[in-house]
Image: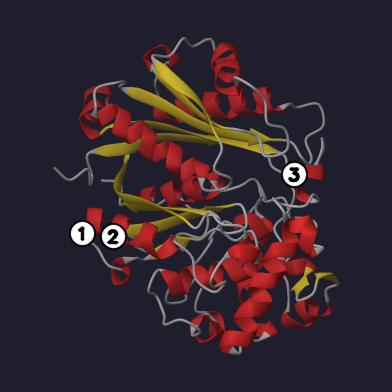
Amino acid sequence: MSLSGRHVIAGIGHTAFGKLPGSDTVSLNVEACRLALADAGIDKSLVDAVFVKVPTSAHEFMFGQKVAEALGIQPRMGGAWDQGGAANITLLSFAIMAIEAGQCEVALVCYADNPRSGNRAVYGRARGDDAAYGWFSTAAGYAMIQRRHMIEHGTRAEDFGAVALACRRHGAGNPLAQLQKPLSMEEYLASPWVVDPLRRDDCALVSDGGGALVVMSARRARELGIRAPVPVLGFGHGQTSWEVALRPGLTSTMAARAAGTAFEMAGLTPADVDVAQIYDCFTVTVLMTLEDYGFCAPGQSGHFVADGAIEHGGRLPVNTSGGLLSETGMPGMQLIIEGVRQMRGQARLQVPDARVCLVTNQGGTMHTHASLLLGQCR
């Protein structure tokens, strides 16, 4: 039996984004969950599962139970999961599978972190055995991937810049975005190097913040009178897993497998997607995702994003609230939340009559990937 459309995101909530001194990861999770429950219009007493992404900046033993305790919930099941930025869609799919198996009925999926006001050292350390190659910081591995894409496909700096410009344009008018400043191509090309060929404006923000989802079956949503449930049409996963230096190739990932699973579940193709929220920790991630998902051929993503094609009003609007490059660098949950807003018809930059939204999450240095297809709220 297909899971497509059998489960919904019933509520969404998020905190402010940026630098939030005095807020810890637990309090940010609680705030986001409270807002998501209020959005769904239900009481926390109905929640019997709590799935939490561990904070990137500070892993903590039994963190999922700590969040449940702070929420005042004793769930039937739950806990914390680490898959980097792919964890939010993964936990959403875990919640759906648990509901389908009769293990729970109403789940909270949440994530929060505070590296901007707390400790951002995790982003500057070597990843795995990368120090042996002189690579330090998250940016180092992505710089190698971006350089390889340029070598293999002739991708230009301006192609990466087109991604940065689109996300910054979308975030500029978002009153809740951390960075509300548009970007010109001249400014992008003049921005300082982080790790050649990565410029500052190729890189995601470092942000405090939290986000949460309420997940249940479509049947339960009808019983509870949920105001604006958004159906989950499909999801899928793929894990490259190996460290960058050990991979046989650097210009494609297991994102293609994740996409194939999600589209098959939904009975859709890339041509059916009206709007996309694509994980943009670095600009190269967006270009490679477009290729891996079949929106364009390998090496053709630079042509695909030219002339504003991924900006609002283009053929495939991407990251309509600003993404990790402008709205907030907190990994992935904000993309799901914006996808829900688009399918409800409530987004700030609403895509007219959008019926299908693609959301992608990606973790590590393209180690993990998760795909999500959302349908129009009716």
Q: Which residue is drawn at 50% across and 41% down?
A: 88
Task: Work out whether residue 153 or residue 271 is closer to the camera in this orientation and state it.
Answer: 153
Does 325 sit above or below residue 32?
A: below
Residue 140 image offset from top left, x and y in percent:
75, 63
Visible residue check, residue 255: yes
Which of these two is toward me, 190 or 294? 294
Q: Judge from the rendering whether residue 270 lies leftward or rightward of residue 201; answer left or right.
A: left
Counting every numbered tag in the picture gives 3
Query: Which residue is depicted at the point 46% across and 9% down?
Result: 74
Which-is-in-front pick, marks 3 and 1? Answer: 1
Q: Distance between the residues labelled 3 and 2?
A: 34 Å
Q: Which amino acid does label 3 sit on?
A: Gly
Q: Is mark 3 on a helix, strand or loop?
A: loop
Query: 52 or 40: which is nearer to us?
Result: 52
Q: Say which quarter of the image contains residue 58.
A: top right
- State whether residue 351 appears in this view: no
Q: How far apart are marks 2 and 1 (CA)?
A: 6 Å
Label 1: which residue?
A: 267
Pinpoint residue 2: horizontal percent, then vertical percent.
Answer: 17, 45
What's the CA distance linking mark 3 and mark 1?
38 Å
- As helix, strand or loop, the secondary structure at mark 2 comes to helix
Query: Of the numbered discs in the image, which one, if any, rests on residue 263?
Result: 2
Q: What residue type is labelled 2?
A: Phe
Q: Mark 3 points at which residue?
A: 18
Crowding at mark 1 (Cα within 10 Å: few <14, some 14-19, many 20+): few
Q: Mark 2 or mark 3, which is nearer the start of the sequence?
A: 3
Q: Is residue 22 above or below residue 153?
A: above
Tell me if mark 2 has few (under 14), some (14-19) or many (20+) residues whose alpha carbon lies within 10 angstroms of its own. many
Contact (CB < 8 A) between labels 2 and 1?
yes
Are discs 3 and 2 less than 8 Å apart at CB? no
**Residue at point 45%, 59% (across, down):** 350
Q: Earlier in the sequence, mark 3 or mark 1?
A: 3
